[in-house]
Amino acid sequence: TDLDNFITGLPKAELHLHIEGSLEPELMFALARRNDVAIPYASVEDVRAAYAFSNLQDFLDIYYAGADVLRTRADFHDLAAAYFDRAAADGVIHAEIMFDPQTHTDRGIPFAEVIEGLLSAMAEAEARHGISSSLILSFLRHLSEEAAFDTLTMAEPWLDRIAAVGLDSSELGHPPEKFARVFAAAAAKGLRLVAHAGEEGPPDYVVQALDLLKADRIDHGNRALEDMALVDRLVRSGMTLTVCPLSNLKLCVIDRIEEHPIDRMLALGLKATVNSDDPAYFGGYVADNYRAIAQARGLDKAALAQLARNSFTGAFLPEEVAQAHV
Ligand code: HPA
Ligand code: ZN
């Protein structure tokens, strides 16, 4: 349809994408075979059937198990290359990609294998599709502060190739304050800062991400809507929220896509963006997310264009590059 074509043709940046969450079942089987790794599924259909989640933790258990097929530099390359092919088809021209080193280093996979595989696919995507990209090293918040510091140390040789650090995994019980010192250390090394906050966690976790982590961007942020003083603060500071509609639906942050608050966020003046989070697990890439909210909330082209503009103003791109797209 006309709106489909408009959405695909709209140049956009994707700011909230976990590369491990782009592992499609077909590639999971191919890598399981290539690496001789056993997986607890009989078929691709069997894998997809397992993707029924009732909360974040339900999903994380399956997501970390799926990542076990990723073993070599070639695997991380192929994973990211597949994402870039899909993103290019969706009109993504810039992507800031989160990766979870601890998911791999804790299984004995060297940090170098992970990041070099990703970097090679990023260079190819630039050459092949004209997509620019950068990396966000995400700390797993269910692990310790010390483990996060160790991960930051491992990343030292590649710091010029990493744009930011992030914070993901199980939110409830792991407030941002647990990582205040490692975020300060990352900032001192010149890295930008993002954190998942307010997906399942309370509005106070968003406040902590701002005050204690000094986050430049909030991933999700949905529950900030429960605190109007916080909304006001986010609006006044021009804080970008990386919102993920199909993720919100699949992880039961909302009960129905028709209840998604994306248009309410825009009406309040929040700098919301639309992203896919873990597209292989949540049933859609970035254009699918735009289409889902356009249909469910009746967003017009102006609102969709605003969301795409917000993705560039919220990106860690040089000012003049971002401005060329707004
Ligand atoms: N929330 C927290 N951790 C995650 C997510 C998410 O949506 N996706 C992958 N890791
Ligand atoms: Zn996420």
Image (tube, rainbow, N blue to C red):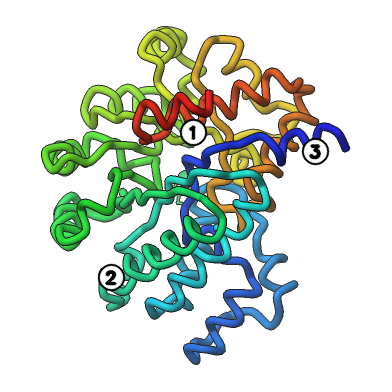
Q: Earlier in the sequence, mark 2 or mark 3?
A: 3
Count of residue discs: 3
Q: Which mark is residue 150?
A: none
Tell us which disc is closer to us: 1 or 3: 3
Asked which secondary structure carries label 1, the reply is strand
Residue 4, numbered circle: 3
Would you say the residues marked 2 and 3 are in contact, meaning their CB atoms lie under 8 Å apart? no
Determine which residue is flagged by label 1. Answer: 242
Q: Nearer the viewer, mark 2 or mark 3?
A: 3
On screen, residue 58 above or below 194: below
Quadrant placement of the N terminus: top right
Q: Residue visible at 52% across and 65% down?
A: 81
In space, the residues marked 1 and 3 are separated at their CA atoms by 22 Å
| Quarter holding residue 150 | bottom left
Image vertical order of residue 187 relative to residue 43, above or below: above
Amino acid type, residue under disc 3 in the picture: Asp
Q: Nearer the viewer, residue 177 or 93?
A: 93
Q: Amino acid at mark 1?
A: Thr
Note whether residue 61 is visible.
Answer: no
The residue sitting at the right extreme is 1
Give how far apart the Cα atoms at labels 1 and 2 are. 27 Å
Disc 2 target residue: 105
Disc 3 C-beta below 8 A from ligand 2 = no
Residue 83 location, quadrant = bottom right
| Horizontal side of residue 143 vs 30, given as left or right | left
Element type where label 2 sits in the image: helix
Cβ(mark 1) to ligand 2 < 8 Å? yes
Residue 238: image x %, image y %? 40, 16
Determine the residue positioned at 26% across, 37% down: 192
Front: mark 1 or 2: 1
